[in-house]
Structure formats: structure tokens, C-alpha cells
Amino acid sequence: MTSAFDENIALVLHKIDDLRLEPVPINEPKDGEVLLEMQSVGICGSDVHYWKRGCIGDFVVRAPMILGHESAGKVIKVGPNVKHLKEGDRVTIEPGVPCRRCDFCKTGRYNLCADVVFLATPPVHGSIARYHTHAADFCFKLPDHVTYEEGAFCEPLSVGVHACRRAGVTIGSTVFITGAGPIGLVSMLAATAMGADAIIMTDISQSRLDFAKKVGATHVVLADNDAEKTAKRVIETLGSMPRISIECSGAESSIQATFYATISGGVVVLVGLGRPLVSLPIVNAAVREIDIRGVFRYANCYPAALSLIASGRIDVKPLITHRYNIKESVQAFQMAESGQAIKVMIYCGKDAQK
Ligand code: NAD
Ligand code: ZN
């Protein structure tokens, strides 16, 4: 006999440092929704942040919340009016479902929708569970040869695709990326696939730089505390000033380095989210006509991210360094927090392999 615990279990964050695997109800798919048997969910820095700090900016965990938003699963039931999916379809899940009615939604910048419902952003539950219901139009069918964990990777990869689109990466671009964590790495992979010639990455960790070099960065440089020194090293190593800089660390000195390094008329894209107020060489940027562009998640990037993976133009598999079963979720989070992993995947399926 199966117990309720076996029917649906989820990883619930009750409060700071208090993560519990516990039974939760299985929801019926509503109009336009599908019920999914979850398979792979990646751990994001934000999941770890909610666990250890209980908040990100104004988003505060006030009630128990299921974590996880980088996910893929199998459709096991379709709700009314779902046309493009059927039982048995394998899908990747875009975690942010916007209102579809406001000007941002109607003009395609739905990531800016004020009413977006985003998984594992309080008070919305995430997807580290055996079962999860989701808007069917934010589920994308995986080709047979794409694995669930590659499907889950479409989430962070979409951030990289969006950052490169915002930056205008194209054939022959020279790109400077600060921070060789998962987000810096997916930005590097997306930039490579979009035609960039040279991609130089910085980090304060030599092991992260070694990894970046192994998976495709053309150049790496250890960041200095002094931003101007870092920029100088970047320019010397690259042999020219990069036209595009993508900041993926959130560190103040690193943001400053992108401004100093970028060629006049170039672009700085801000992906990293650190302290809310930082000091920047703004006159330098103004008189050299540096364009500064923000990035908030992504919009319309899942199909591109999936196509890059499905076609083999991007291989995300080397970035998946650790795998756990849902029952070992707390260990998985400890590993993600340790800084030793790049991407930790949790397998949620009933007969999930590790
Ligand atoms: P991470 O912490 O794994 O990686 C950050 C990397 O930056 C680390 O390897 C760290 O060693 C490095 N770093 C720290 N200080 C540095 C410095 N001074 N110079 C160069 N490198 C330095 O985080 P991640 O998951 O890769 O995410 C990166 C950033 O992107 C975070 O700030 C995260 O909040 C942000 N993010 C933003 C969005 C968005 O929509 N804008 C989406 C996802 C993540
Ligand atoms: Zn909207």
C-alpha cells in the first residue's frame, strides 16, 4: 500500500535553515494547466539564498514554501482546454507565468509583468516535488534525445540567452564576462553559440576559472580587488578592449571592472545582483557612451535555449557536477551551498535514477 508520503513529497522551506521533505497535496490541473510528474530540478543560487537568509530583497519567506524552479517533468494529466500537450509528453517548465494581459506581456517583455507568478519566489511554491501543476503554455516539449536534466538546464541557459540578446552578441563579438558561476558560464556558452569570437572571463576563484576554460572560455583572468587593474589585465590578455561586458558576479569591484574594460560605444549588461547601491565610474561611462542594460530573468528565451541544447550547439552536461535523489534534498542543498558544485540536480521521479 502507498502512503500519502509516497504519493507526493516536496522540499518545503519553513524558515531560515529549516528545510523539510514532507507530504503535500496533489493539485488537479485547472483550465489550461497540466499535472506533471516531476523528474529533474536544478538548485539555483536563489534557492540556497532563501534557505540560508529567508529573503531576497523584498521577497521574504513568510509561510512554508516549496523550493526549486529549474525543472522538467512528464505530463500525466491535462486540464481543460490544453491543446498542445498530452499525457506522456516530456517537457521543460518555464517557471514564470505572467498575466498575459498587461502592456509588458502584450509587447513581449513579459519578464517585466508586475503580476508574474514565478516558482519558488515567495509566496509561490516551487517545483521540488513529485507532482506539480503548471500552465501548459509555459511547458515546452522535449525532443526524445534531450534528457530531463538538460530540460531543467533550459532555465539558467535562458538567462544567458537573454543576457546575450540584450548585449547584442553576434558573429565576431568580443565579450568580457565577470563571474564564472553557473550564470557566467551559461552566458559564455550562449555567447559562443551566438557567434562570439573571444570570451574572457574573470573570477576570484582560480578553480572556477580553470573550469570555465575547460568548458569553453577562450581566456581567463584572476580578478584583482582593484577594478582598474582587473580591466587592464583583461585588455592586455584579450589584446583589445571588449565591445560587450556581461557582469555575472554582483560584486562591486567586478561591476566597476566592466565599465573600465568596455570599449567606447560598447555595452555593459548587468546580470549579477549584489548590493542595491554601488559606486560606479559613471562619468567615464557617460563620456565614452557606454550603454548600460539590465537583465531580469528572460522572456521568449526557452525555445532558443532548448534548440541550442537539442541541436548540440550547447552542451550543458559538463556543468552538472552533482546529482541527488529527492529524498537526499538537504544534502543536495548542502553541496550547492558549499561552493564546490557548479550545478546540482535533484531527481524527483518515483523511479528516478540518482
Ligand atoms: P555564483 O555565486 O555561483 O557565481 C558568482 C561567481 O562570481 C563566483 O564564482 C564568485 O567567485 C565570482 N565572484 C565573486 N566576486 C567576484 C569579483 N570581484 N570578480 C569576479 N568574480 C567574482 O552565482 P550564479 O548563480 O552564477 O549567479 C551570478 C549572479 O547572477 C548572482 O548575483 C545572481 O543573483 C545573479 N542572477 C541574476 C539573474 C537576473 O535575472 N538578473 C538571474 C540569475 C542570477
Ligand atoms: Zn503582464
Image (cartoon, grey):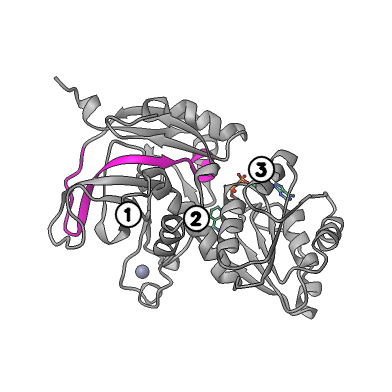
The numbered mark, 1 or 3, whose residue comes first in the sequence reads 1
In the image, residue 137 above or below residue 346: below
Left or right, 101 with respect to 220, comes to: left
Q: Amino acid at mark 2?
A: Leu
Which residue is identified by label 3? 211
What residue do we see at 36% from left, 38% from top? 128
SS at mark 1? Answer: loop
Residue 179 image position (x, y, % from top left): 67, 51
Which residue is identified by label 1? 143
What residue do we see at 51% from left, 55% from top? 314
Left or right, 348 with respect to 55, comes to: left
Q: Report, in whole angstroms, how far the alpha carbon at label 1 lies from the one at label 2.
A: 17 Å
SS at mark 3? Answer: helix
Q: Looking at this rendering, what residue extends furthest in the top direction?
A: 1
In the image, residue 241 above or below residue 335: below
Q: Along the line of sight, which residue is nearer the eye, 61 or 89?
A: 89
Cβ of mark 1 under 8 Å from ligand 1: the answer is no
Residue 187 image position (x, y, % from top left): 58, 58
Is residue 19 in the magenta section? no
Q: Along the line of sight, which residue is nearer the eye, 277 or 137?
A: 137
What residue do we see at 86% from left, 61% from top? 236
Q: Amino acid at mark 1?
A: Pro
Left or right, 3 with respect to 322, comes to: left
The numbered mark, 3 or 2, whose residue comes first in the sequence reads 2
What span is in magenta? Answer: 26-49
Whether residue 131 is visible to the viewer of this picture, yes or no, is yes
- In the rendered image, which quarter is residue 273 located in? bottom right
Which residue is identified by label 2? 157
Local crowd size for mark 3, using a 10 Å CA cut-off: few (<14), some (14–19), many (≥20): some
